[in-house]
Amino acid sequence: RTVYVNGDYLPETEARVSIFDRGFLMADGVYEVTSVLGAKLIDFDGHAVRLARSLSELDMKQPMSKEELLEVHRELVKRNEIDEGLVYLQITRGSDGDRDFVFPDPETTEPTVVMFTQSKPGLADSPAARKGAKVISIEDIRWGRRDIKTVQLLYPSMGKMMAKKAGCDDAWMVEDGFVTEGTSNNAYIVKGNKIITRALSNDILHGITRAAVLRLAREAQMQVEERNFTIEEAKEADEAFTTSASAFVMPVVEIDGVALGDGTPGKVAKRMREIYIEEMRKAAV
Ligand code: PMP
């Protein structure tokens, strides 16, 4: 694979980052994942806008313009011949060559920019989506700024492992009795023709896929309700699903061992997955 590090395209084995980089020592960095369908980028603009916000919330410099970022994304897709897959982008605060809690001087310390691709054939026509996901619920013990897309992914990673150990695919996190989100996706339940998902706040990541799916649902005359819901309400819902840039709309068929409906992907989830993929393909860059 060819990867991108601080201005250079390199074979992955030759890419180098300092051991003092604050991304490595302190998870002081942010990231984005943009999916690729038909060798084109899905919702690149949305990801670029959220990246700028994450950087600004952490007082980090925007090291490259949106146009420059797009160019590197496209170049990596081309060089690595990605038809279906994703582009991962990470920007960390870099380092001034030592370890300190105090941020290094932004005048003299450049952020570290890393980008690489992952090929994922079957992203659109996904066997996992045809089957649907089984989720468990776990307590949400993450920090209070989940709206910033930082690389602090240890707890979500542990959540995935808990799910795996329980024979499931993912975990939904619960705080004060209400579902916040999945370990790497936003969470939804469906009652009749109504799609219910938690409203935006600092408690959840403002999913780029979420924004598109809610827009498309409204355009398709479906009802959307942005409010809190409990795991108990979710277990009694007609259907459930999650959204993320890397899995699009993923039907959820079981929560804590309780099957939803007949235990197969629901019709609203399937329809939203189809609409999302179709519309986003058309708008891909
Ligand atoms: N919530 C969390 C915690 C996530 O990690 C992600 C994916 N990175 C999402 C939601 C979905 O966001 P997006 O649709 O932008 O991928």
Image (tube, rainbow, N blue to C red):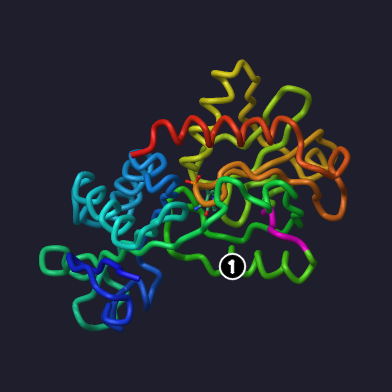
Q: Position of residue 96 (x, y in %)?
A: 19, 77
Residue depicted at 49% across the width and 32% down the height: 212
Residue 284 vertical placement versus 24 (above, below): above
Give the main secondary structure, helix, strand or loop, of the magenta stretch. Answer: strand
Q: Image check: 127 left or right of 257? A: left
Q: Residues within 10 Å of mark 1 (few under 14, many from 20)?
A: some
Observer-nearest of 24 and 228: 24
Residue 214 quadrant: top right
Cβ of mark 1 under 8 A from ligand 1: no
Task: Kindly identify which residue carries mark 1.
Answer: 157
Residue 4 vertical placement versus 100 (above, below): above
The amino acid marked with disc number 1 is Ser
Residue 1 vertical placement versus 214 (above, below): below
Q: Position of residue 117 (x, y in %)?
A: 39, 62
Residue 40 vertical placement versus 22 (above, below): above
Under circle 1, the secondary element is helix
Residue depicted at 39% across the width and 73% down the height: 26
Residue at the far left in the pictured view: 107
Observer-nearest of 205 and 34: 34
Q: Is residue 170 magenta?
A: yes
Residue 273 quadrant: top right
Q: Position of residue 160 (x, y in %)?
A: 65, 65
Q: Quadrant of the C terminus?
A: top left
Q: Is residue 40 magenta?
A: no
Residue depicted at 61% across the width and 41% down the height: 249
Count every numbered label the image shows and give the total. 1
Q: Quadrant of the N terminus?
A: bottom left
In this picture, which residue range is highlighted in magenta? 168-173
Residue depicted at 21% across the width and 56% down the height: 61
Q: Position of residue 263 (x, y in %)?
A: 85, 44
